[in-house]
Structures are given as structure tokens and as C-alpha cells.
Image: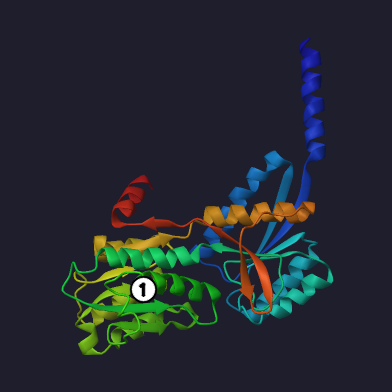
Amino acid sequence: MVFKFLLIIIIVKDILLEQIKDYKIGLALPFKDNFWESYYNNFMNNSNQFLNEGINFTIIVIFSKKSMSIQQADIEYLLSQKINVLIIVPQDTKASKNIIKYCEIIDIPIISFNRLIYNTEIQVYISPNITKVGELQAQFLLENYGKINKTKFLIMKGPNSDLNSELYYEGTINKFKSDIRTKDKVDDLSFFVKSEIANWEPKEGEKLCYNLKKEFIDDLGYIVAANDDIGKACIIGLKNRNISLNEIYMAGHDNAQNTTDYLFYEMKSNYFTVDMNQNSDTYIALNVSKNLCLGRPFDFNKTIKNQNYEIPYLTGEVIPITYQNFLSLKNKR
């Protein structure tokens, strides 16, 4: 009886092993730092969940060292490895269009991840719900509007060429326009200073904050930082002007650990960030990859206009992080 039972287990195990399908995912990330390494780790961790569905993902990752030419060579390498799906965070959203030609020739489906490849008909675009990020940032500042004797806003956004920058900026501005206290001030440059931060470069944020005119900076109370790194750089610029942080509220996003540790230490409850929830985005990307590998359709409920194309658009959840949330999470580390 025991022998028969063991034999059944072995047969079932063999059948299950035969049913597991192996697929290769090419993961092209723009450079190697804590933020993108964390994304890679989330991809790896989430890939294990699909074993229960009979899918074994092998993820081949490349980090492109902030170079478009390196990323192009890396994509060629990934294609030589006979990948089934390419997940790419484009180094350059416009120049990356040329990379897509290689994939189209050999019919490799493409997921544009976190940044949308400009004017290209790809299978899907997946990112955090970046419009919601902008809304949450503005909401935090509005909740604290009037608590200090300051009236002016500094809105920092990423490069105009980056769709995510435009989406989160849109979410921020629309939230301000929906509030009776700020809706008539949003387009008044004496109240709302808006600035593009080229290439998401923190040093540009530091320089901007250091060079603000005295009459504006003396009444500056509310800041939307393009991300947490730029928020940190902005604080450095303000401190170099001997500006007290006690009467400034700031909202950023990304929730990169070392950076937010610094920001919450400096500003306490006057700072707020949004966690991009990498676990959510990476799971969505792998689930779509599964369907693409199996030749099945995937669910989406909205599209995004990409110049001449309408692209299926999927967004992951985002998580607001207050000072209280931060302390609670830090205690669990």
C-alpha cells in the first residue's frame, strides 16, 4: 500500500514537471543603483509565484550604465539569448524606437516598463499609477495649507520628454485646481513657480532651490519635489541659503530607503512621499509576460495615446507614506 502511494506521488510529480513551461524574459534596466536593483529583486521574487501555474521564468537582466549605445548593444545580446519577451525601461524614450526594430523583425513582444518608448506600437505600457502619485502629493500639501504663515508653492517636475513626468504633473496641478483655495493661484507665477528638472538630475534641484529669488523664498511654504532624490537636493539648497525647514511642507515620491531616511529625519511630519510599490508593477509585468508567452490576450481597461498609437496601459498600486507610516515601517526593519 505504501509502495503504491509513493508510486502515485512520483507519477504525479513527473506529470507536473512535464507540464511546466520554460520561458526567458529579457529585462533591460537603465543603470545599476539601489532603486533599479530593487526592481530586479522584485521581478525575481515574483517570478517564483508563476511556478504554481506551470510557468518557469528565467530572467536575464542587463543594466545599461546610463548609455543609449550600451542599451542597444545589450538588447542585441538579450535577443541572441532567444528571449520570449522583452521588458525594457528605455534609456532614452525617443532614441529607443530604433531598438524596437530588432524585436519586430524576430517577433519578440515588448513591454515598455516605467517609461514609455516614444511613438512606437508596443504590446503594453506598465507603470505605477503616476497620476495618482501627483494627486497624493498635492493632497498632502493642501491638507497642510494654512498651517504656516507662508503662501507660495514650488512645483518641480521631471523632463518634459518623459511621459511619467507629464502624468504626475497633470495629477498635481489638477488637484490644486480642484481646491477653492488654490484654483485661482495655480497659473499665477507669483504664487506657483513651476520648473522642469532636466534628466531628473538632483543637482539641478539643488541649484534651483539655492537660486530662488529672496522675495519668493521668504514666502515659500509648499514644495512638490519631482522625486525624493530631488527633494533631498532641494533641502541642501535651502539649507545653504539658511532657510529653516520648520515652515516648509514638501512632498516627493519613490520612497528610496536611504533618501527618505534623510528627508524624514530633516523634516519629520512636514515631509510626505509615495511608495511606487515595485511589487505591484513587477507582478503585473510578469503576468502580462505569461499571457504573451502563451499567446493569450491580457486584460486592460484603458489605453494611453503614444503619438500615432493607442497603447494598452496598466498601472500598479501606489502607497502614501507619512512620517507616522515611516516610523512604523522603520521599526519593522
Q: Quadrant location of the N terminus?
A: top right
**Residue at x 32% of width, y 63% of height:** 140
Asked whether residue 253 is in view, the answer is no
| Residue 99 found in image quarter | bottom right
Question: Horizontally, is 71 left or right of 320 in the view?
Answer: right
Residue occupied by mark 1? 177
Viewer-proximal residue, 198 or 157? 157
Residue at left 43%, top 82%? 197
Q: Is the image coloured rainbow, by chain, by secondary structure, or in one colour?
A: rainbow
Residue 39 in the image, given as x and y percentages of width and height: 55, 59
- Residue at the limit of the structure toward the left, as seen here: 149
- x 20%, y 88%: residue: 215
In the drawing, does residue 168 fall left or right of residue 313? left
Indicate the amino acid at tag 1: Lys
User: Residue placed at 84% from the left, 68% from the top?
Assistant: 106
Left or right placement of residue 296 versus residue 236 in this view: right
Residue 214, placed above or below residue 294: below
Q: Residues within 10 Å of mark 1 (few under 14, many from 20)?
A: some
Residue 107 x %, y %: 82, 66
- The quadrant holding residue 175 is bottom left
Residue 33 sits above or below residue 328 on the image: below
Residue 35 visible, this angle: yes
